[in-house]
Image (tube, rainbow, N blue to C red):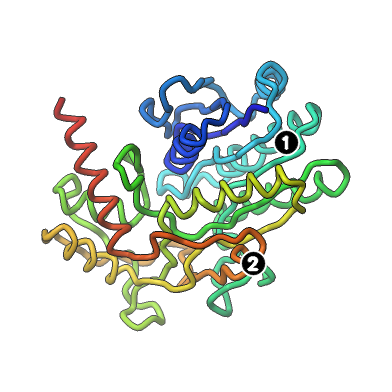
Amino acid sequence: MTILITGGAGYIGGHMALRLADRGEEFVIVDDMTNGVPWAVPKNAELIVGSIGDYELMAKVIRDKNVKTILHFAATLITPDLYQNPLEYYRINSSNARALLQAASDCGIKNFVYSATSAVYGNPKLNPVSETAELLPTTPYGKSKLVTEYMLADLAAVSDMRYVALRYFNVAGADPEARYGQSTTKTTLLVQIAVQAALGIRPVLNIFGTDYDTFDGTCVRDYIHVTDLIDAHELALDHLRADGESATLNVGYGHGYSVRQIIDTVKRVTRTDFPVSEAPRRDGDPVEVVADAAEIRTRLGWEPRFDSIEQIVQHAWKWELELERRRSI
């Protein structure tokens, strides 16, 4: 009854690996290590370095390891260096996912948990935004992730596969015990960027756009602690194992913070000051995106444990200090 985690050496997938290890589950990780880090892999867990776009590899892993459930995290995130190369998003997030789904279908996988995104909503007309809202992604990232949602739903409609697609909002924070956290240098996650600025790793923090129609002119997002997100994946896994129906669910707290509020919180929690500059808007950035997460509470019984922006920042800061300690060894 092995579980396959794709992207299990990355930020969110690495936290999922920790959770499965804590549960005593048998699992295997496939990661191409583009954004993965070795210490994300728990001791005694198996890491297979390779691409989920390699059909032969994925089919072999599923058969040889007796995989019954797939937790799919592998993807490319929103990064400035890819914004002028939109087809790369579709190659990694859509085409590679298609190969994975083909292997899963051919090998009889019944349970599939997909790491979806709130980027499918684009710039919502109404916040908090529910799962029934119109899907109008404004970026290649959001569009490429939505393509995989469509493929997954279409496959489930004609097979025995059942799935849970979790559309999560702005993930932040780190394992409360500082065992793992965001560790790549190319992050675009605001909380991590801000704590790196507090440490002096980044010389300045840029605010992209200060003329949005919000109370302070900066974008508003729903920030969710990575541990609460992993709780949602754990519940989705148990739901499918108990023969639960397929579902597409938001994962967020239902309230948002502006970019300036996040920066102020980081300065307050870390007791530091750092340079902040104002830059032009980035293409595709929505004004405000906040989750209506009533459905996941009802369907899966999800109850967040870390709904505090101060606590999210504290855990991100604690992990960044741990990274600094590791670098100095």
Give the mark toward the camera: 2 or 1: 2
Residue indicated by mark 1? 101
Question: Which sits earlier in the primary sequence, circle 2 or circle 1?
Answer: 1
* In the image, farthest residue toward the right: 158
- Quadrant (top left/top right/bottom left/bottom right) for the C terminus: top left
Q: Residues within 10 Å of mark 1 (few under 14, many from 20)?
A: many
The answer to which quarter of the image holds residue 275 is: bottom left
Residue drawn at x 29%, y 50% is: 316
Cα–Cα gap, marks 2 and 1: 28 Å
Residue indicated by mark 2? 298
Residue 210 placement (x, y as % from top left): 31, 74
* In the image, farthest residue toward the left: 272
Residue drawn at x 48%, y 35% is: 17
Residue 218 placement (x, y as % from top left): 34, 73
Residue 159 placement (x, y as % from top left): 86, 41
- Quadrant (top left/top right/bottom left/bottom right) for the N terminus: top right
Three-letter residue code for mark 2: Thr
